[in-house]
Each structure stands twice: as C-alpha cells, then as structure tokens.
Image (spheres, helix red, strand yellow):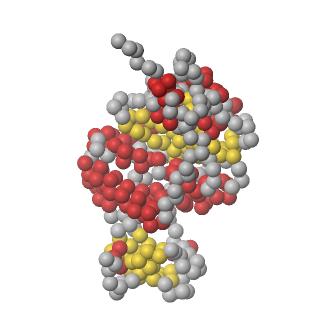
Amino acid sequence: MRAARPLLEKRDHNLKEQPSFLPSNNQPLVPAVLEDYPVSRRDVGGGDIVHNRNFCHRFESKNRKKRKKNSPEERQKLLALEKTNMVQSLRWAGLDDLATEIDLCHKEFVVLRCGHCGTSFGQPRTCHSRLCPYCAEARGARIHAKRQSDLSKYNNYVFLTLTRRSIKHITKDDVQFTYACWEKLYRRKFMQDRCYGAIATFEVTHRRPGFHPQLHILIATRDCPLPIKDIRKAWKGYTGAWWCHIERVKPPLADAMRELVKYPLKPIDFFKKPEALKEYVQAIQHVQLIRGYGCFRYIREAFKPHAPLSNTPCPRCGVKGYLEKIGDREPITKFRRMPWGWLYLPNAPPVL
C-alpha cells in the first residue's frame, strides 16, 4: 500500500513560493522553528494542540484584504441578531429571568425633553448585563471615552492571547486561577521592563473535551518586542499549556477596546449546549472579567453608570442642566433613529 503523503507536502504545491519560516517536508514542525517569526506572526502551540491544515492558510497571502467596516445600521442589525441568539440560548438553559431581562433591553425608552433646544428624545432602558450585546457595546465606548487620554499616551500596542488546557467543568475558582497565573506572569522582570500596562479579559470556548479558558490582553509596550520564548516557558510552568499568540494592534484603539469587552459574550458559540451555558453563567457571577494592570489599573467600568439629569448633556445641542423626564416605558415604535440619538415622535405613523 502506498504511504500517505505528509500534509505540509500537499499544501506546498498550492503555494506560489515556499515561505521561509516553514520547515522542509522531511523535518517535523517543532516550536523551535516558530522562534524566527516576526512579532506580528509569532504563533506558538501549547498543550495537546496539533497544528491542522488551517495552519498554512494563515501565511499564504502577504497582502490580505482588510475587513470591511460595518455601517451603524449594519452594526445595529448584528447586535440585534446576537441578542436574539443569546436570549434563545438562555431560555434553553433554563435561565428565563436573565433571558427576559436581556430581551427587554433597548425595547422600552425613557422620554426626555431638552429645555434649551426643545428636542424630545428617548433614552433606552438597558439591562446592564454583561451578556447583553447592547450593554457590552456601550460599556466599551464608555471605557474608551474615559481612558482615551491614557490610551493615547502610548504608541505601541500588542494583543496577547494565552490559553489553558481544556477542563471538563468550569467554576469561579477556574476563572480566578487563570487571572492569578497571568498576574504572576505580568510581575516577571522581562514583562515589567517592556510593558507600561495591560487590560485583560476572559473568554471561554466549548469543544468536545470540555471548556477551554483563554485570556486576551491588550498591552502597551515599549519599543522592544515581548520575549515570546520567556512568556511561553513561564506560562507553561503556571498552567501546563504553552500556547500563546502575539500580534500588533493598529489604530483605532476604540475597535480593540470594543472587542475586548465583548469577549465574555462568546458563549453564543455554544448556545445549543444548555448545560454548558448554564455552568458558564454561574461561574462568572460576581467575578470581574475585565481587569487593568500598570498604567491601566483603574480601567474598571461599572455596567450601571449613575448620572443625574443635571450632569447629562443633550445629545443634540450638548448643553447640560436643561433635561426633564416626560415619559417612561414607551415602545420603540414611537421613536426614529437619528445620527445623534432617538427622536421622539409619538404621533408619527409607524415605519413599514
């Protein structure tokens, strides 16, 4: 019987030129070869992870097409679809109260009137849940607005991903242990000499072996690159897994901050597994999932921002101190989406 050809040999015929960082067909793919990657392409395997056929696809094209940025209308449609999937998955998991709370988010409005410009507009009633796409989007925008001056002080940002071995069940102790391992790594001298600060968030995926915890970290670095070899060695000593990935972050930073805040929403990827989703929701209750370190140690932002009307500016004219409440729990059919917010039109015909 003819022996099967190696996977890398099969993929090499489809490449126009042999990448310099891939080994030859007679050499095994070992982590030592990956040490020669540039900073933006370092990708180190860990644990029992085996490089699959998608490994070669990531480096076939040097000039990738940039992902098209969605318009505000398309963004709202995507958020509505994500919320629908989340609500459906929570109901399958038996979390009806949380599902109803998220389902009513952005469906009822508080009506406010500005005495300066005379505009009547709506403020959506939110659920303030970390699993709600609308609330997570608003939270990311608030964090970036409050810390924009701090984020703009540094020019070099990298995105570090650290993963652990798969676990059969997940609890609060597993989340705290993952952050404790990262804090040990961040306090190492080779990290302190190269980092100004970091923002870390927690993510969990679910595959056949079980839950797969991950940490996604936005790091403000100095001019020198991070030592991937030392990071891998230290992380393996703490968790037993040495998979990590580093890539450079390009502006605008608002997009990176928005993606960081939305990583806890990843359970929509396994919404058809109600038992796993329920276990995940119970594990993250009363646990801080976004944490700051170094110059970003005060990055924490509450999901329930409390601001009196006297300190709230009008979204249309921007003047403070003239807002008054004139209605509550009005349906979305009485409002029209404008570039500056939700315009209140109680007598307008519904838009078909």
Q: Residue at x 38, y 73 (%)?
A: 109
* Nearest to the observer: residue 349 or residue 114: 349
**Image quadrant where one finds the N terminus:** top left
| Count of numbered circles on the image | 0
Residue lying furthest top: 1
* Nearest to the observer: residue 307 or residue 278: 278
Q: Residue at x 45, y 44 (%)?
A: 287
Provide residue 266's location: percent of width, then percent of height. 41, 46
Provide residue 271's location: percent of width, then percent of height. 32, 46
Q: Is residue 208 visible?
A: yes
Is residue 156 placed above or below 311 in the rendered structure?
above
Q: Is residue 278 left or right of residue 115?
A: left
Is residue 191 placed above or below 112 in the rendered structure?
above
* Nearest to the observer: residue 15 or residue 249: 15
Q: Residue at x 35, y 73 (%)?
A: 332
**Image quadrant where one finds the C terminus:** bottom left
Q: Is residue 50 left or right of residue 107?
A: right
Provide residue 219's location: percent of width, then percent of height. 63, 43
* Nearest to the observer: residue 130 or residue 62: 62
Is residue 52 placed above or below 344 in the rendered structure?
above
Is residue 147 placed above or below 48 in the rendered structure?
below
Q: Is residue 180 visible?
A: no
Q: Residue at x 52, y 28 (%)?
A: 12
Provide residue 159's location: percent of width, then percent of height. 59, 42
